[in-house]
Image (cartoon, grey):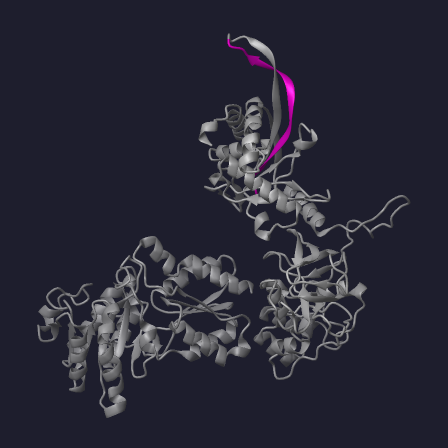
Amino acid sequence: MAVKTYLQAISDGLRSEMQRDKRVFIIGEDVGVYGGAFKVTQGFQEEFGPWRVIDAPLSETAIVGGCTGAAIMGMRPVAEMQFADFISCAWDHLVTVAAKQRYRAGTPVPITVRLPSGGGFSGGPFHSQNPESSFAHIPGLKVVCPATPADAKGLLIEAIQDPNPVLYFEHKHLYRRIKDEVPEERYTVPFGEARLHREGDDISLITWGAMVYTASEAAQKLEEEGLSVEILDLRTLAPWDKGAVLRSVEKTSKALILHEDTHTGGFGAEIAATISEDAFENLDAPVRRIAAPDTPVPFSPPLEKAFIPQVEDVVAGLKELAEY
Amino acid sequence: MATGTAVDVVMPQMGVSVSEGTITKWLKSEGEAIAADESLLEISTDKVDTEVPSPATGVLQQILAQEGETVAVGTKIAVIAPEGAPVERQEAPEPPTAEAAAEAEAASGAEGEAPTQQKAEEAQAPAPEPVPAPEPAPAPPAQAEEGNGRREAKFVSPVVARIAAEHNIDVSSIEGTGRGGRVTKKDILAYVEHGQAAAPAAPAEAPAPAAPEAPKAAAPAQPQEPQAGETVEPMSAMRKGIAEHMRRSLDTSAHVTSSIEIDMTRIAALRQRLKKEWAGSYGVNPTYLAFVARAVVDTLKDYPWINGEIRGDSIVTRNFVNLGFAVELADGKGLIVPVVKNAETLNLLGMAKAITDIAQRARDKQLLPDDVQGGTFTITNPGGYGTFHGTPVISQPQAAILGTYAVVKRPWVVEDEDGQDAIAIRSMMNVTLTYDHRLVDGALAGRFLRDLRERLQSWDESTE
C-alpha cells in the first residue's frame, strides 16, 4: 500500500469522486488556476476543466449559496473555504437554508464544505480556529474531522456521496506532517464510527483531529510509567460514536476529553455530559476536559503554544486522573 | 458575622501534602465568646505551626479534640454556637466528610451550614441499596484517634459504590490507594477477587486487606516504660517531621563539609554606618547574615550545581535562587526553614527586609505553607551563640547548605602598605559549606567558598 500525506489523501479522494461522478464539482477561492491555497486541487482544472473546478469570487456567501442551489438541482458540489475561519460568512446559507431544506421541503442538499482548520503554525486569530462544535450543534449538518490519511480519503468520499450538507474539517497542521498507508482503490469510512487509536485499560482519552497525535505521544510517555491509556479517535462529531465512548468508559471508569477548540461549549462538553448521563455508575473519577482556553488563537508562537494543548498538558491531566 | 446556626470548626488543610495536624493549644475554652477571624487555636503540622482563626462569631460551644491530639484534615474539632443557643453536646470527633474538607480549604471566614451526617451519606452512596455501614460506635475520645485511621468516610465514587452494593461490601474496610486514601475501582476489584477467594465462609472475620498489618515492632521491642528520673513527652508533629527529614537527608546525600575563614572587618565597618542610616529610614538591621546571603546569591550564579538538585538520573539547575533560612522557634523546640523566593532579585536592603520578615513570621507562627517550600539553597546561622564550626544537614532535595559562625576579633596576619607581613586585629568569621558529594566535588566547593570570601572581603557598596 502506498504511503501518502494527509493532504495527498484528501486530493486523491476528491479526484476519485470527480472521475467517478459527473455531478461532482469543486468551487472555491483560488482552487482552479492556482490549485488551492494548500495545493489540494493542484492540476484539477487542467484535468477536469474550468466548469468543474470553479474559481469563485471572494465571497463565502456566494460559494455556499451557489452550492446549495446547485445541490437542490441535483449536483454534488464540493466547496473549499480557504480557511475554516471564513465559514462564518456562509453561516446563514448553511444553517438557515442547507441544514433545514431536507426537513422543510424534502429536498436533499448534498454539499461538502472542505474546511482547512486548526493552528500550530502562527496563523493568528483568523486562520487557526476549530469551529466544529458550532456546526455540530446544528441539526441537519454533519461534521467530520479526520486524523489519519486513510480516514481523510475514506471520509471525504463518504461526505461527497452523503445526501446531507457535510462540513469536512481538514487539519492544516496534519497536511504534510502526517504520512501513512492509504489504499489505492475507492473506499468509504462510515460516519459515526470511532476508531480505536490505541487500546488501554486505565483511562479513556477521547479526541479527534490533530489532537490524536498529541494524545498518542502523551500515552506513549505514560506507558513507560505503567499507565495504560486508551485513545478513541471519534473521526466524526455529527454523528458521534456514543457507543464506543460509553463502552470504553465502562472498561476504564475514567475519561479525559481532549480538543484543540476552546473550552466553553466545545464538543468535549457534549461528550462529558453524555458520559455523566449514561455512564455515571461506571465512573471512578470526574470526567476531565483539556481544551484551549477561552480566547482567540494568539499569533505569537510562544503564546500559541501555551494556547493549544501540548503533550505535557495531556500527560499532566492523565496523571492527575490516574492518581485520583 | 453573627451565625444563625452552629458552625463546625475543622482541621484546616495547611498545604497540599499535609494530611493531618496536631492541636497544640486551645486559645479559648468552652463557653467563651469568640469573634469571627479571632484566633481560636494553635495547630502544628509537619510543615508549619500556625494559628487557626474562628470561622464564625459566637460561643465556643464544644471542643471535640483535645490538646496534643493529632487528627486528619477535615476532622471536626470544635463547634461554634450562635450566642444564646442551647448547648448540645456531641460524643466524639466526627470523621471528616468530603464537604467538610472542602469547607476547610475554602476561606476560613466562610459561613456554611454544617453538613449533616445524612446529607454526607446521601452524597456518597448513590447506589439504590446503600451498603449497610457499621453502626458508628460512640467511641470514647481516647480511642477516637485510633479509629480515625481506618474509619474515615472517604469519597466513594459511583463505580465503587455500585460494585460495593453488588458484592455487599463495606467500602470503609478496604485500604484505598487513591488520592487521600480513596478506594479506587481497582482497589475494590482487587478486594472482591482477593476477599472472596480467601475467606468465603467466614464473613465475621474481615478479609485480609491488601497490606496486612505488619508487626511494627520488628526492630525495637515495645516502647519501654520510663525509668526512675526520666520524663516522657510525645513528639510534636514538627519534631517528627524534623526527625524524619534529617534521617532521610543523611541516607540520601553524601555529606561533606568544607570550611573557610572570612575577614569581615570591612563589612563590620559598613554595618556600623548603615545601621544608623537604615534604622532611621527603614527600621531594618543590616545583619551579617544579610551580607552573607547577598554574596551567596551572587556566587551561586557561577556555581549552578550548588544551587541545583539531583532528580532521578538528572541534574537540575536553575536561573533563580530560593534561599532558605533555618530559623529557631521561640520555644526552642524546633526549627523551620522559611524560604525567600527569587532572592536574586533582592539588593542588600531587600534581603535584610526579607530575612527579618520571614524570621519574624516564623516565630509568630504566621508562615504559610508556601513560605516553607521550594527552597534551592539554605543558610543556617548558629554563629549567634559563639560556635565557630559545625556540619549542618542538607535540606532535601537541595545540594548544599551554608553554615555561618560567630564573627570574632582575632589576630590575623595581613600585608601592610609596604608589602610586609603584620599582625592585625580583624573581625573573622568561619563559614562552612556542607555539600552533597554525589553532585558537588570538593574542588568545586572550595572554589565556591573562595569566591564567596572574595565577595565579602572586597564588598562593593556601589553595586547595592
**Split into 4 quadrants, where in the image is the C terminus of chain A?**
bottom right
Q: Position of residue B328 (x, y in %)?
A: 68, 41
Residue B119: quarter of image: bottom right
| Residue B185 seen | yes
Between B60 and A244, the residue placed more toward the observer is B60
Q: Main secondary structure of the magenta part?
A: strand
Residue B386: quarter of image: top right
From the viewer's perspective, is B221 left or right of A279? right
Q: Is residue B401 above or below residue B99?
A: above
From the viewer's perspective, is B353 left or right of B329? left
Residue B413 is covered by the magenta coloring: yes
Q: Position of residue A98 (x, y in %)?
A: 23, 83
Q: Position of residue B10 (x, y in %)?
A: 67, 64
Q: Is residue A216 above or below residue B329?
A: below
Q: Which residues are magenta?
A: B398-417
| Residue B306 seen | no
Outermost residue toward the bottom in this view: A105
